[in-house]
Amino acid sequence: MAGLDWVLHVDLDEFLAAVEIARRPELRGKPVVVGGDGDPTLRAVVATASYEARRFGVHSGLPMKTAARLCPDAVFLPSDPPAYEAVSATVMDTLRELPVVVEVLGWDEAFLGARTPDPEALARDVQHAVKDATGLSCSVGIGDNRLRAKVATGFAKPAGIYRLTSRNWMSVMGDRPTDALWGIGRKTARKLADAGLTTVAELARADRSALARRFGPTMGPWYWVLAQGLGGTEVTTAPYVPRSHSRETTFQRNVTDRGELEHQLCLLAQRVAQDVVDEGRPAVRVGVKVRFAPFITKTRSMTLAAPTSDAAAIQQAALTVLDRFDAADQRRAVRLLGVWATFPAPD
């Protein structure tokens, strides 16, 4: 039987927590939370949580102090990026030994391109290979394009396999909220709901011209494409090229002094500028992220007059962007500050 072209999305389950548990087998079955310095009394956010911790409502991005309140018996561990990078490299090398094209998306996920008559059998081979090499489990989504494979992985978790294609897309996804789609977050879902579009099926039936008028000529029709489950099928081995670099810091005590805030901003901008130099590409846009107390996050950014890797120019741009926050925000206490620089789009 001739094979068909398939896209598989491989996602390592509870990756950071799984790496830590593999190093500390006595933690297996216990709620484990990874983030910051591992101290839940300090300001930091959860990087990941084991499934046992997630049952208490702990999830990535949650303040560590909140995680401790929700799950006081959890084991809190510091983030260890070098360890995660090493395990990730082993996983990706293992995937490359299979008859697939591997496109790395991050530490814990990759797209695989394959021609096979039995994608489920291939998915099982992937799971077994990863398990044998690292002891970790992974979920595999199967699709006839990248979007459907990515969404399918959510139905496969944990450690399962799920297929989404044009044949079952709408029967599976139609009644689900729009933020079930890859590429639509909660804020966009609220905007779509304001337009009377609360489900994937409703968005798929919407008039594309009306969507363009309401959400813009690019984003509006793109939301419709997502609802249809349409997307590219190409999987490439080309290395990932970052679109930006960012640095941020969480203050253990809220910062209210403007001078101190600008000082910290300059330090972050200098670190970002060094990242830009190391990347070997100039920045074209600079942005600032501010998390105000108690937990309200806002961002502003500006396009640079010319592409640059100059630290002074990036620093000055960051200070200029900071001034663009509303007057009311300028008076608020700050708990987190971040700076990012965006690179030109690849040719």
Image (tube, rainbow, N blue to C red):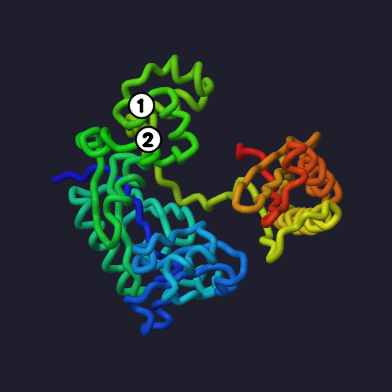
Q: Classify mark 2: helix, strand or loop.
A: helix
Instruction: Check disc 1 and report the residue beneath it.
Output: 203
Q: Amino acid at mark 1?
A: Leu
Q: Classify mark 1: helix, strand or loop.
A: helix
Residue 294 x %, y %: 62, 53
Residue positioned 44% across, 15% down in the render: 210
The answer to the question of whether label 2 and label 1 lie on touching residues, with beta carbons closer than 8 A, is yes
Instruction: Check disc 2 and report the residue beneath it.
Output: 178
**Residue 13 visible to the viewer:** no
Q: Nearer the viewer, residue 276 or 234?
A: 276
316 horizontally vs 69: left or right: right
Q: Quadrant of the C terminus?
A: top right
Residue 305 x %, y %: 80, 34
Residue 235 x %, y %: 40, 46
Q: Would you place residue 336 above or below residue 93 in this image?
A: above
Q: Amino acid at mark 2?
A: Thr
Q: Nearer the viewer, residue 7 or 21?
A: 21
